[in-house]
Every structure is written in structure tokens, then in C-alpha cells.
């Protein structure tokens, strides 16, 4: 498991504490990639709200503040109205009580009404993914971005696994590069959960396919005390353990890999608990009849859609004894009421546990919201892809470059 998450970086709060922002040009890379409807209205503004503390810190410290983000999947060099950050600027302005201008053509200089941004003022720089060379981390583009600022602040954990001009290149070339409060909080939580965890360390990795999370499972098998698998992943592990799974979703070609994960855990005195009971149905639908049965009694035409109540209780009891919990993925089809019990029981156990818990991934966040345990989870990660890459043991580009810059 990578330990680079614990490496020292410069934090925005450090620079503010020593008065280094006053009168300076500060460039913040935020994650303002919010969902919109067909008319361009923002349907959910969590990312905007989450980005404001960093921006406000810089403003209060007397900096001239420029913020950019990607939005959607625009084509570089080909602006379309739906790519614009205008709606984001309007919503952020409402939340902050400000009129926030959006600067369109900003790579060669940021001007508002012919003047540079004044200290204590804020502008949004149009969608950074429109810039030619952004995704390929063009050094020429990155140097132009770096020339716009005295201090670069990375506060977009959702992009921390990508080396792009506005995330990595600018951090390379800016006079000072630091982590904003959101990125710093993610780094601290990941470090606490994976670098020096309080044990037992229990990981829950669930989802439809082993193949998409195989490297995560292999990495965690070397570090965790218990590896709970769920969803289609659990079905593949049940097959590997010699159980029948009927017509359930699984990947029979990955049985050897599943067995090697089980063996790696066993060699360390740890385990991958295999379900002893399951909830099955004959069809995949919300109104399908749910049947609880022993894992040894699965019929050829059964679909396994959840873990059974005995398995759920056993896992919950183990979670209550954990020191640290990492959660990625619901253990059943929790969107259907008849097949939500396993995920609900596990979510409640995480909420009731005294362990430090960190959760990430879209479906996981949906489960946390459904069972209203947001305030009972130690840390909820905002970056899906970045969170998964950390679990794989990879060093995220954002952490790598900020660590290098801090080291001088």
C-alpha cells in the first residue's frame, strides 16, 4: 500500500497563517463539475458548496482569486454554450452574496474590464477542459497557467488521479503550489485509514464485477484484516469457494484470481467471509419475489441479489469490533426494497461502530444518503476514480507533484 498520502505538502492554511496571500494572485483548481438538466439548470450543488470554504479563505486573506474547473466533457478548442461555467458562477454568487464574472479567454492574461483581478476580488475562469492541451498536460499550456499566479491551490480531489495541465502541470511551474482544505482533508483521511490504521482494518469492496476491482482486492489483501466482498464480486468468490450461484452475475474466468486473494488473506491469518445465506429471486426486478436460503441451496435458475440476514448480522458484528473501516460499494441491489437488507444492516453497523470509517464511490454515497448516516461516517470521499486508485495502492499525481514541490 502506498504511503505517499502521508507525505508532507504545503497547505493553503499554512500560507494563510504566515500571511503569504495578501495582495497575491491565487489560482484555485476546484471541482465544480455539477450535474445539470437539459436546460442547463444545476440539479445538485454539493461540489459548489464544498469549494466555497477554500475560495473564501483566499479572499479573506487578501488575495486576488481566480478559480477554474472542468464541466462535462467538452471538446478542446471547441466552445459550446452548454460547456460554460456561467451557471456555476451564478449559483456560487448566490451562495456567497457576490457577483462573480466569468472570464472566457484567459490563458494569456486574466482581465476584467481591461484590468487585472484586484485583491479581495474573485473571478471564475471558463471551463479549463476547453483549452487545447489540457488533458495531455501540455507543458506550454501549464507554463502559461502558472504565469497567471503567485500561488496555485489544488482543491479538486475528484481530479487528483489525473495529470492534466490545470492539476499537475501548473503545480509543477507555479511559484508556490499547495493543497486546499478539501484536498488536504482527503489526504488526511486516506492516510488515517490506510497508512497507519487502527486495527482491525476491515474493507468492504462490492460491485458488479471483480475485473474492475481486482487490483484493489489484491492490494487490500496485503493490508486488511478482513475483506468483505459483495454484489457480483461476492458471487465470483462464492463460485471460487465451490458454491453454486445459479444464473447470478459473476466472472467465472477470474476464479483463480479470487482464490489467490482468499489464499493471500488466509496466509496472513485474515479472511474473506463467504456468505452462508443469500436472498434470491427468479428475475431481476423490483417486484420479484425474494427468497432467503442457505448459500448451499441456490438453484440453477436463481439470481443472488443480496446477502442473507445471518451473513449480514455476522458481518455487522465484525464491523462493530473494527478499528478502521474502508467502504466501497453496496453488498446487494439496495435500490430494490426486497434486496436492501444486507446493505442497510452494514450501513447501520458502520454508523454504530466506533471505528474510523472512510467511504467512497457513487453507489456507496447513494446508500449513505438513503440510510441517512452521513454524520456517522468518519469521512466521505468526494472523488470516485481517485478514491479507487488510492485503494489500488497507486500514488495519485496530485499528491506526487505537491509532495515534490513541498520538498523544494
Image (spheres, rainbow, N blue to C red):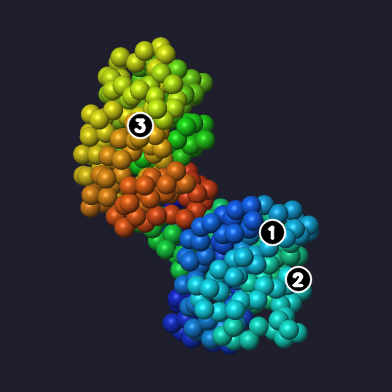
Q: Secondary structure at mark 1?
A: helix
Neighbour class for label 3 at 10 Å: few (<14), some, many (≥20)?
Answer: many
Badge 1 local density, few (<14 within 10 Å), some, or many (20+)?
many
Observer able to see residue 407: no
Query: Do callouts 1 and 2 mark residues in contact (Cβ within 8 Å)?
Result: no
Residue 45 in picture, x, y percent from top left: 51, 61
Q: Which residue is mark 3?
A: 339
Give the spatial CA distance, label 1 vs label 2: 14 Å
Q: Residue 7: where, in percent of width, then height?
A: 45, 62
Which is more N-terminal, label 2 or label 1?
Answer: 1
Q: Which mark is residue 105?
A: 2
Foreground of the two, 294 or 151: 294
Q: Earlier in the sequence, mark 3 or mark 2?
A: 2
| Above or below, comparing residue 334 to residue 252 in the picture | below
Give the number of the mark in front: 3 or 2: 3
Q: Which mark is residue 262?
A: none
Up-down relation of residue 156 to residue 254 (above or below): below
CB atoms of marks 3 and 2 within 8 Å: no
For the point 27% across and 50% down, the residue is: 351
In the picture, measured across the screen, residue 324 lies left or right of residue 173, that is left
Give the Cα separation between the discs numbered 3 and 2: 51 Å
Query: Residue 377 at x, y = what percent?
Result: 32, 54
Residue highlighted by disc 1: 83
Image coordinates of residue 218 in percent, x first then y, are 44, 36
SS of the residue under disc 3: helix
Amino acid at each position: 500500500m502506498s504511503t505517499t498520502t502521508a507525505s508532507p505538502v504545503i497547505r493553503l492554511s499554512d500560507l494563510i497563517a504566515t500571511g503569504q496571500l495578501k495582495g497575491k494572485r491565487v489560482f484555485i483548481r476546484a471541482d465544480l463539475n455539477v450535474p445539470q438538466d437539459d436546460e442547463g439548470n444545476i440539479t445538485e450543488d454539493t461540489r459548489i458548496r464544498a469549494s466555497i470554504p477554500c475560495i473564501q479563505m483566499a479572499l479573506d486573506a487578501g488575495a486576488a482569486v481566480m478559480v477554474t474547473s472542468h464541466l462535462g466533457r467538452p471538446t478542446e478548442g471547441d466552445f459550446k454554450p452548454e460547456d460554460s461555467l456561467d451557471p456555476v458562477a451564478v449559483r456560487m454568487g448566490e451562495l456567497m452574496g457576490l457577483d462573480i464574472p466569468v472570464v472566457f479567454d484567459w490563458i494569456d492574461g486574466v482581465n476584467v474590464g481591461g484590468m487585472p483581478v484586484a485583491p479581495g476580488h474573485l473571478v471564475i475562469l471558463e471551463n479549463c477542459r476547453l483549452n487545447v492541451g489540457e488533458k495531455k498536460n501540455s507543458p506550454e499550456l501549464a507554463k502559461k497557467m502558472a504565469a497567471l499566479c503567485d500561488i496555485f491551490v489544488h482543491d479538486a480531489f475528484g481530479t487528483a488521479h489525473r495529470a492534466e495541465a490545470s492539476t499537475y502541470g501548473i503545480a509543477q511551474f507555479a511559484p508556490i503550489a499547495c493543497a486546499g482544505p478539501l484536498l488536504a482533508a482527503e489526504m488526511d483521511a486516506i492516510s488515517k485509514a490506510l497508512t497507519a490504521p487502527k486495527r482491525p482494518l476491515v474493507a468492504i469492496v462490492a460491485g458488479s464485477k471483480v475485473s474492475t476491482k481486482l487490483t484493489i482486492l489484491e492490494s487490500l489483501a496485503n493490508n486488511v484484516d478482513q475483506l468483505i466482498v459483495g454484489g457480483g464480486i461476492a458471487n465470483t468468490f462464492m463460485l471460487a469457494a465451490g458454491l453454486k450461484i445459479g444464473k447470478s452475475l459473476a466472472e467465472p474466468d477470474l476464479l483463480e484470481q479470487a482464490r489467490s486473494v482468499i489464499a493471500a488473506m488466509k496466509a496472513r491469518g485474515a479472511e474473506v467471509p463467504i456468505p452462508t445465506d443469500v436472498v434470491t429471486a427468479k428475475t431481476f426486478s423490483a417486484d420479484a419475489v425474494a427468497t432467503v436460503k442457505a448459500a448451499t441451496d441456490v438453484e440453477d435458475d436463481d439470481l443472488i441479489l443480496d446477502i442473507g440476514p445471518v451473513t449480514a448480522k455476522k458481518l455487522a458484528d465484525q464491523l462493530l469490533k473494527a478499528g478502521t473501516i474502508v467502504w466501497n460499494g453496496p453488498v446487494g441491489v439496495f435500490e430494490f426494497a426486497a434486496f436492501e437488507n444486507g446493505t442497510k444492516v452494514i450501513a447501520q453497523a458502520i454508523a454504530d461502530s466506533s471505528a474510523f470509517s472512510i467511504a467512497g464511490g457513487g453507489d456507496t454515497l447513494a446508500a449513505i444518503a438513503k440510510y441517512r448516516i452521513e454524520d456517522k461516517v468518519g469521512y466521505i470521499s468526494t472523488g470516485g476514480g481517485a478514491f479507487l486508485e488510492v485503494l489500488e495502492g497507486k500514488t495519485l499525481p496530485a499528491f506526487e507533484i505537491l509532495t515534490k514541490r513541498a520538498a523544494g
